[in-house]
Amino acid sequence: MKHQTIHPFSFTVKQDGAEAHEEDVSLSALFPSPEEPLRILIAPSGFKESLGPEEVADCVEEGLRRLVDHSAAMIRKVPLHDGGEGFCRAVVAVHGGETIPVQVTGPVGEPVQSHYGIIRKSGVVTGVLDMAAAAGLRLVPTDARDPTKTTTYGVGELMAAALDQGCSRIIVGYGDSGTSDGGAGLLQALGVKLLDADDNELPKAQGGRSLVDVSSISLKTLHPRLREGNVHIEAVCNVINVLCGERGVARIYGPQKGATPEQVEGLSLGMERYAEVVSSILGSNISTEPGSGASGGLGAGLLLLGGQLRPRSEAINDHFAFDSLFEQEWDVVITAEGMIDSQSTQGKMTTEIARRGKKNGALVIALAGTIGSGADSCLESGIEAFASILQAPTSLADAIQDSPRLLREGAERVMRMIMVGMQLRSPSPRGMRQRPRSPSGRMSWADEQMVGDELQKRLVPIAVPPWVQSPRPLSPARVGTF
């Protein structure tokens, strides 16, 4: 009688009480066959102040490849640039443009090295910029995080540089901002004057604290290319964010950027005053205009310039052919972002990819640095399960520094759990009896218990960390086709 014992990375076959041979194998040998490899799409966003989308995708793949080789899994990586840092370089790479380095005013008023992109196609010159490359949170030292003072002046300098290159189209990626000045700094860098009640020009690059003093705005000295009215400006942003009100940008994002409760109230008052002035010029109320609060209110500044605020999912699909990813079928989609919480369903790319994955019939799993309040709402947006990569309580600084290792190990744990699900739902693993099912297709409780006992004998237990949450068992219809 043949007896087989399976260990994590090797198995020993014994026959008639004698050891026949021992062979080291990858876990992947126990699962998908070379003829039918698992199809995995890795589509993560970046981790704020830590890793960009490309780096996150690489780490996740490395973690998966610890368990599945190329014959067992076909993996494709598609980093998600949702307008945050790295957006400019990604768009330029896709469309064959060039990246131009430039020094601009950083969010705390000090010079920083930045860049913008130029794309020349069909006689049209397009400028591409990340607001995060000039006013991102990464550029604000931890001890200087005060959104009442940080400025978007450098973003305006990037736009002016692109205009001076002859651009008739400007695409601005919003995200990862460290400012809350309503785009006032950007406007000032482009020649706009903010005036107080006595018609005195307010100091430049003063941040959100100066908004409460804005009484009028003069466009007489606006950049000449913009005054001509022949430049199309497009902002890729989260249109859920609005400038004012209880869901206004200061109240929602101010604390994340270092604002105290008192500063949040001051910023909110300033945004309301600023919205009144801008609205009077445009002839329509922008205080709750979709996207007006994006990136610390930068949307409001671009609305004054006649800019178009486009939803991330729509714009990203245009610039990166996002929907074409799902012309191919995927068994598993793994996405990731720095924090999964109630805001993840509000226009974030993780849930956008999840919706498409679910529609495609894929199992969607999300990794995150941390799990925040309201994260369960993501389960209604196509994400089947989510998990934090953290293994123990740690400081933010340590987590950021150690994020590559944590991502690799988190991805490896996810792959192990997928394998367990495959064993439970797919045709029996080698050497394991397949129990007959009832006419309804369901196992009886006794049958499930016997299968569980059989697995317990044959597999080294795999610990399922308490931070893993899954709304329901893996679907037999999907997992059975791996």
Image (tube, rainbow, N blue to C red):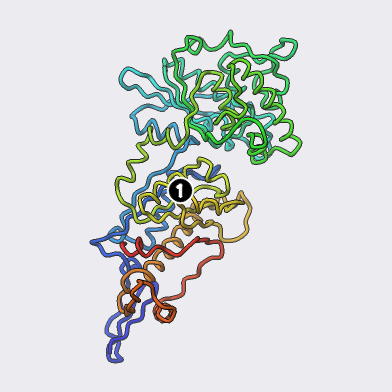
Q: Residue at x 42, y 44 (%)?
A: 54
Furthest residue to the left?
Answer: 35
Question: Against 115, is 481 above or below?
Answer: below
Q: Quadrant of the C terminus?
A: bottom left
* Few, some or many residues within 10 Å of mark 1 (<14, 14–19, 20+): many
Return the x and y of residue 387 as percentages of the image width and height: 52, 57
Return the x and y of residue 445 as percentages of the image width and height: 44, 78
User: Does residue 61 show up?
Assistant: yes
- The foreground one among 85 and 232 is 232
Q: Quadrant of the N terminus?
A: bottom left
Q: Which residue is mark 1?
A: 56
Q: Kindly identify the amino acid type of the residue bearing the numbered disc 1.
A: Val
Furthest residue to the bottom?
Answer: 17
Place residue 313 in its image quadrant: top left
373 relative to 43 in the view: left or right: right
- The foreground one among 189 and 140 is 189
Return the x and y of residue 238 as percentages of the image width and height: 52, 35
User: Does residue 432 show up?
Assistant: no
Place residue 302 in its image quadrant: top right
Question: Against 68, is 75 above or below?
Answer: above
215 relative to 456 in the view: left or right: right
Furthest residue to the front?
Answer: 439
Return the x and y of residue 332 as percentages of the image width and height: 38, 55
424 relative to 35 in the view: left or right: right
